[in-house]
Amino acid sequence: MTTLTALTTICPPPASPPSTPDWSQAETELGMRLPEDYKQLMATYGPGEFCNFLSLYYPHAPREAADLTGPMPARLRQQIEEVRHNARQPWPLPHPPEQLFATGVTGNGDYLFWVTQPSDKPDAWDVAVNQALRAPWYTFTGTLTQFLLAVISGTTRVPFFPEDLLDNGTTFTPARPTVEPPPPTDQQDSMNPSDIRAWARANGHPLPDRGRIPTEIIEAWKRGHTV
């Protein structure tokens, strides 16, 4: 039984397979190969949350904070150094910051990183977990899928993860689809602030030439205008 099969046995993935990312494009943008176990993991589960606690980053995610190919991994490396050096007593790092590549986050603000050594052998990368960009650190020897299986099965406990993490069962909750804002209506397109101000003054609502137009005045203007 493979690690992924064991994981899906105790934590079933979504019934409908998620869309598969363009791995070639993602790796080109990152300038590095990604672990094969991660690709298979994402192809099986897609974006979402394990045990209502742990989420993995995903290529080209709609939210920047969850985008594996966005600025978040580099930003976190910088923030680790900033937090560390601003502390009264800087703590030692178990891995050089340049070797850490963020791959997930927990509900408590703990971050998961690949330890990208050797850089040309992504399938050999270990997983490091950091408590909210501060000490302590926990390093797991194995792949990201092996780490998830070990944590979700209860065979490994990260010291700063909640003790009741598994009390509600081993679940995976798919991320909600991003809702695109509705296209502007013709009435919204025709909403000229100058016209609204002129209408408001003509109807006894004094407004300055600049600043926010109160919502109630905008709604009153809408009620009196049809396109």
Image: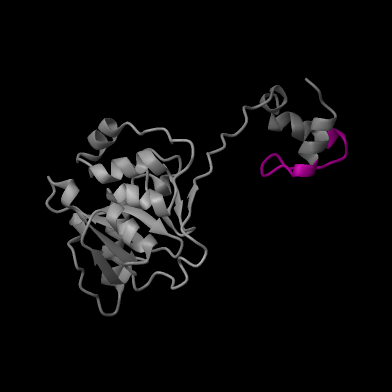
Question: Which residue is painted at 33% across and 57% down in the image?
Answer: 149
Q: Which residue lies most toward the bottom here?
A: 89
Q: Indicate the position of residue 37 as horizontal and vertical percent values.
A: 26, 45
Does the image show residue 135?
yes
Q: Can residue 56 be seen in this view?
A: no
Q: In the image shown, does 210 or 172 lie closer to the viewer?
A: 172
Which residue is rendered at x = 57% and y = 37% of the image?
A: 179
Q: From what the image shows, is residue 98 above or below residue 90? A: above
Q: Spot the residue most to the right.
A: 204
Which residue is drawn at the image coordinates 53% and 39% (left, top)?
Answer: 178
Asked if 166 appears above or below 21 in the picture, the reply is below
Q: Residue furthest top?
A: 227
Q: Position of residue 29 (x, y in %)?
A: 26, 36
Task: From the viewer's side, name the closer residue of 91 and 15.
Answer: 15
Q: Does the magenta stretch include residue 67?
A: no
The magenta segment is: 201-216
